[in-house]
Amino acid sequence: MTYDEIINAVENGAKFTINFQKRTCRVNGKIVMSEEDKPKDTPYLTHAVVLFAIEQRYKAYKHSVPSERSESHRRYYFKALPEKELTDEDMMYGERREVARCKLELYVLMQLLRGNLAWENRWGRWFWKSENDKDLIILRDWVEPNKGGA
């Protein structure tokens, strides 16, 4: 499945799970993206472009509108604002949280699969933190599984 097909499925109620360490995306329990079928619709991008796009998707996710479905998800890679901290504008115009989470996590996965997101030593041993939003953190273990802090 392509990025757009996966997002469309989630918008229409499909459940999804992304595992950065295993480099997989599951939709309704079925693996639809993995190392074996790297996405062909993602061009080569520089780290600066990739990180900017992640920051934009993270901002949308952070201010997204939670639902019972999104709140029942067991594991989150990224932190979103709780409902009580959202503004009226967020609540009126924000994207559904599960869709925003899918867009963010799937974009990160696709950049990992494509090789556009690789660990840079200047980021440190454990994680990269955005200078624009201190809540946005990418763990080294997501980028280089089993090497975080090594």
Image: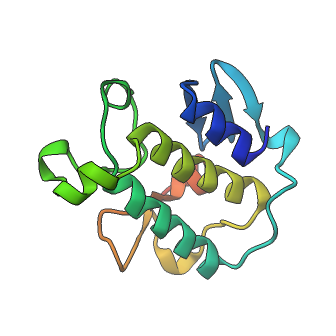
Near-viewer residue (18 or 88): 88
Nearest the camera: 34 or 98? 98
Residue 22 in view (yes/no) = no
Determine the residue located farthest toward the left in the rendered image: 84
Q: Quadrant of residue 69?
A: top left
To which quarter of the image does residue 9 belong? top right
- Identified at 29% across, 70% down, the residue is 134
> Residue at position x 58%, y 37% from top?
18
Q: Could you tell me residue 123's position as x and y percent?
A: 48, 75
Percent across and percent down for residue 46 are: 70, 79
Whether residue 127 sits left or right of residue 40 in the image: it is: left
The answer to whether residue 86 shows anywhere in this view is yes
State left or right for residue 149 relative to residue 118. Answer: left
Residue 37 in the image: state x and y as whole percent: 86, 41
Q: Residue at x 77, y 38 (%)?
A: 34
Which residue, as the protein is rendered here, is positioned at the far front? 92
Percent across and percent down for residue 118 are 66, 66
Placement of 67 over or under 140, stated as above or below: above
The number of numbered badges drawn on the structure is: 0
Residue at the spot 71% in from the left edge and 46% down from the top edge = 4
Could you say which is closer to the camera, residue 92 or residue 127? 92
Task: Decide if residue 73 is on the left or right side of residue 123.
Answer: left
| Colour setup of the view | rainbow
Q: Quadrant of the N terminus?
A: top right
Query: Does residue 80 sit above or below 99 in this rendering?
Result: below
